């Protein structure tokens, strides 16, 4: 007797063209995973008749549904499609300054520095706080600025402030070089209008049993990231769907191979609050909740007709060593703060990265533990729609924006 094992299981998926239309066989993707718990469910209806035998005489299966979670270790580009569906938006093209000759580079402290323009306008070009850029074209003392990941932590029309994520100091240089700032990859955020409604066909193929399960009309109902004090960064995608069909042959016969990008580790992560790197965070767990729900049944069929979207909730929790009252006072004063989580795959100049930018957050508590070790504060936060952001400003008009160096 063969007992199926997880190492012989494949997770294949492809975006559908519409609700009720299973994805075509070609151009699917095999996804990396830690586990996928998606499964078919059925409601159960127990008879409530009171009989002389004092026993239950009937039980029926009812409404069919699909639910579970795809869990993985977060890496650039790997879950681009799922992230887009979770945020109900499409990925935006990269921003480029084009060639400029009026930019002055200045080093401030450590790897931090500024890039100041005279004739251009960083805001109208489209750069945003939380975006990572890479420069080209610098010469002589400015050469260290070329091909390094530079995270923007503050921005005005003429001054771009930030930090080199690999720790290399910004190379000071007077204006005159023909330089270009380019955002690697793409970005995405929860939109103001024209939200997408994506449906996926997701397959579990158990090759050791020659058995498959094809889940249709699946929606990605959020995204939960966990960055522990030490270890790899993980991600969960809750999934809801409408039905499953079993089979004895792999449905997606030629899926693309899984991505090969490096996995993010907490050691290469950094959290910035109000533009300042917080060096005492021991964990950071942002969460995007889609709050989507199926209809709940209609007469004459055991299948739901659709899964409906609802307003997003974006929140999270960070644990912080109690070495100052900064976080506590954000809570006490109900101060709105910007939070940025920057992740890189390693410490090299052009490492793969993802950045989660939450431009408007409120700290919800600052409870402290007690004991013989260093005290920690548990700091939950709620992210809100940034009504001050948008075109020509330093921030995005959204609750959360995500930047991925490998998004295509």
Image: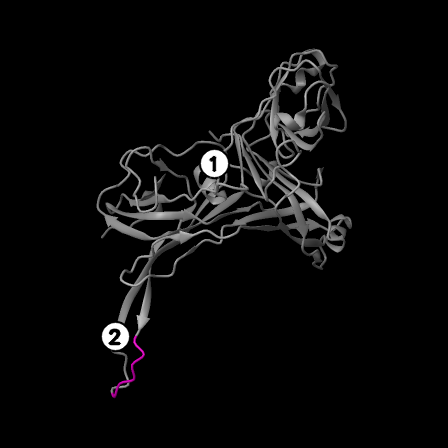
> Outermost residue, bottom direction?
52
The mark total stands at 2
In terms of secondary structure, where does tag 2 sit?
A: loop
Disc 2: CA contacts within 10 A as few (<14), some (14-19) or many (>=20): few
Q: Position of residue 61 (x, y in %)?
A: 28, 65
> Outermost residue, front direction?
193
Disc 1 target residue: 90
Q: Please name the predominant secondary structure of the magenta segment in the image.
A: loop
Which residue is drawn at the image coordinates 62% and 25% (left, top)? 125
Q: Position of residue 295 (x, y in %)?
A: 39, 58
Q: Quadrant of residue 150?
A: top right
In terms of secondary structure, where does tag 1 sit?
A: loop
Give the CA distance from mark 1 to mark 2. Answer: 49 Å
Q: Quadrant of residue 187?
A: top right
- Does the magenta segment cover residue 50? yes
Q: Position of residue 82 (x, y in %)?
A: 44, 41
Q: Is residue 358 above or below residue 393?
A: below
> What is the number of the mark on residue 58?
2
Q: Is residue 169 above or below residue 242?
A: above
Which span of residues is magenta-colored? 47-52
Disc 1 or 2, which lies upstream in sequence? 2
Which residue is drawn at the image coordinates 37% and 48% (left, top)? 218
Q: Position of residue 319 (x, y in %)?
A: 65, 51
- Does the magenta segment cover residue 345? no
Q: Nearer the viewer, residue 352 or 307?
A: 307
Q: Is residue 175 above or below residue 213?
A: above
Residue 205 vs residue 263: left or right? Answer: left
Which residue is drawn at the image coordinates 29% and 84% (left, top)? 50
Q: Is residue 181 above or below residue 392?
A: above
Disc 1: CA contacts within 10 A as few (<14), some (14-19) or many (>=20): many
Q: Nearer the viewer, residue 214 or 24?
A: 24
């Amino acid at each position: 007797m063969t007992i199926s094992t997880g190492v012989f299981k494949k997770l294949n998926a492809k975006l559908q063209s519409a609700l009720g239309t299973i994805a075509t066989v070609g151009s699917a993707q095999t996804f990396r995973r830690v586990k996928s718990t998606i499964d078919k469910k059925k409601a159960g209806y127990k008879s409530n008749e009171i009989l002389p035998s004092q026993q239950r005489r009937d039980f029926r299966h009812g409404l069919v549904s699909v639910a579970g979670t795809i869990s993985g270790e977060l890496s650039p580009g790997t879950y681009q499609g799922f992230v887009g569906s979770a945020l109900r938006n499409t990925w935006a093209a990269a921003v480029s300054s084009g060639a400029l000759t009026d930019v002055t580079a200045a080093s401030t402290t450590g790897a931090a520095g500024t890039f100041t323009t005279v004739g251009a306008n960083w805001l109208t070009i489209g750069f945003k706080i939380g975006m990572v850029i890479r420069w080209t074209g610098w010469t002589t003392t400015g050469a260290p600025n070329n091909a390094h990941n530079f995270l923007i932590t503050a921005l005005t029309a003429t001054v771009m402030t930030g930090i080199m994520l690999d720790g290399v100091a910004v190379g000071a240089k007077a204006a005159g070089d023909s330089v270009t700032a380019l955002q690697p990859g793409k970005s995405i955020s929860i939109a103001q209008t024209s939200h997408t409604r994506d449906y996926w066909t997701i397959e579990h193929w158990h090759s050791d049993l020659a058995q498959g399960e094809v889940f249709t009309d699946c929606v990605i109902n959020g995204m939960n990231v966990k960055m522990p004090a030490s270890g790899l960064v993980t991600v969960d995608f809750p999934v809801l769907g409408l039905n499953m069909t079993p089979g004895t042959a792999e449905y997606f016969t030629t899926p693309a191979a899984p991505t090969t990008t490096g996995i993010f580790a907490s050691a290469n992560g950094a959290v910035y609050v109000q533009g300042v790197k917080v060096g005492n965070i021991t964990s950071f767990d942002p969460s995007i909740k889609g709050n989507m729900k199926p209809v709940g049944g209609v007469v004459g069929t055991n299948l739901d007709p659709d899964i409906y979207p609802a307003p997003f909730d974006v929140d999270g929790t960070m644990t912080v060593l109690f070495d100052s009252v900064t976080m506590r006072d954000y809570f006490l004063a109900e101060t709105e703060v910007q939070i940025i989580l920057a992740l890189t795959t390693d410490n090299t100049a052009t490492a793969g990265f993802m950045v989660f930018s939450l431009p408007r957050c409120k700290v919800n508590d600052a409870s402290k533990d007690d004991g013989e070790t260093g005290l920690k504060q548990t700091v939950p936060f709620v992210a809100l729609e940034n009504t001050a952001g948008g075109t020509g400003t330093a921030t995005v008009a959204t609750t959360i924006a995500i930047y991925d160096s490998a998004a295509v």
